[in-house]
Structure formats: C-alpha cells, structure tokens
Image: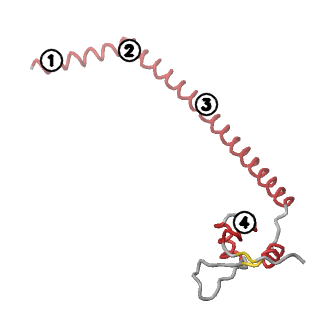
Amino acid sequence: MAERRILNSWKEIASYLGRGVRTVQRWETQLGLPVHRPAGRDHSAVLAFSNELDQWLDSRPVRRSLSSAAESASIASTQAVEMQALLRRAEILLEKLELMLSRNEEMHRKLLLTVNAQANDPIQQDLRGSETLGAARGEAA
C-alpha cells in the first residue's frame, strides 16, 4: 500500500498532481477533487490525502489517444471536404465574373462604335447643326 501523505496547501496539492494551483482549484469545484477544509479555519485553508487523490485520479475517465486521433482525422477530413466545396464555389464565381467582364467589354465596344457612327453621320451632324442654330436664334431674339 502506498504511503499516505497529508498535503496542507493548494501549492502542495498542485505539486503532487503535477498541475498548477488554479487548475487544481478548478478541478475541486468542477470535477469533485477530494479536498478537505478544516473546521474553524479560513475558507482558503485546505488539506488533502494523497491516497484519496490517487483514487480520484484512477476513477476519472481517461481520454483515449486513439479516439482523439480518430476524431482529429475525422475533423480534418470534414474540413478538407468543406475547403474543397468553398474552392469550387470560388471557381464558379470567378468564371461568372470573367463572363460578366467580357460582356461588359463587348457592350462598351459596341457603344463606342455607335457613338462614333453617330458622330460621323451627316444627318446627325445636320440635326446637331440645326439645334445649335435654333438655340442661337433663341438667344438673339
């Protein structure tokens, strides 16, 4: 049977468990770490018995490294699938943007041709000339 030691402070308990004081205090409140408070003493005064701590540690469920490795692989696989889906959506959006850009450039080219054709059209020039003449007559009157 292991020797029973009495641990008289949070620091001693933490040292025995190989953890920090705050972690050990959190284990007491959240996980039921067996810590005793002497009657009539300040709330911060604590003691623990090494054999009780050992029993508590032995009774805790242990995380299996294989299980967590499998979970990590599953998460990584899921993330890879999600990344591939995002990449595909980005490629589709890029294709649509390129198509819209080429359509925009084509419309701009057609508009320039139309404007240039109207600027060089003698009928349009005559119409603009008569509008200018009418405006000048209106100002003169």
Q: CA distance from mark 1 to mark 4?
A: 104 Å
Residue bearing mark 1:
137
Q: Nearer the viewer, residue 131 or 90?
A: 90
Neighbour tally class for label 4: few under 14, some 14-19, many 20 plus, Cα within 10 Å: some
Q: Nearer the viewer, mark 2 or mark 1?
A: 2
Q: Which residue is mark 4?
A: 15
Q: Earlier in the sequence, mark 1 or mark 3?
A: 3
Residue 63 x/y as whole percent:
82, 65
Q: Earlier in the sequence, mark 4 or mark 3?
A: 4
Tell me the kind of residue under disc 2: Ala
Q: Quadrant of the N terminus?
A: bottom right
Q: Secondary structure at mark 3?
A: helix
Question: Mark 2 touching mark 1, by CB under 8 A?
Answer: no
Amino acid type at circle 3 is Glu
Disc 2 secondary structure class: helix
The answer to which image quadrant residue 67 occupies is bottom right
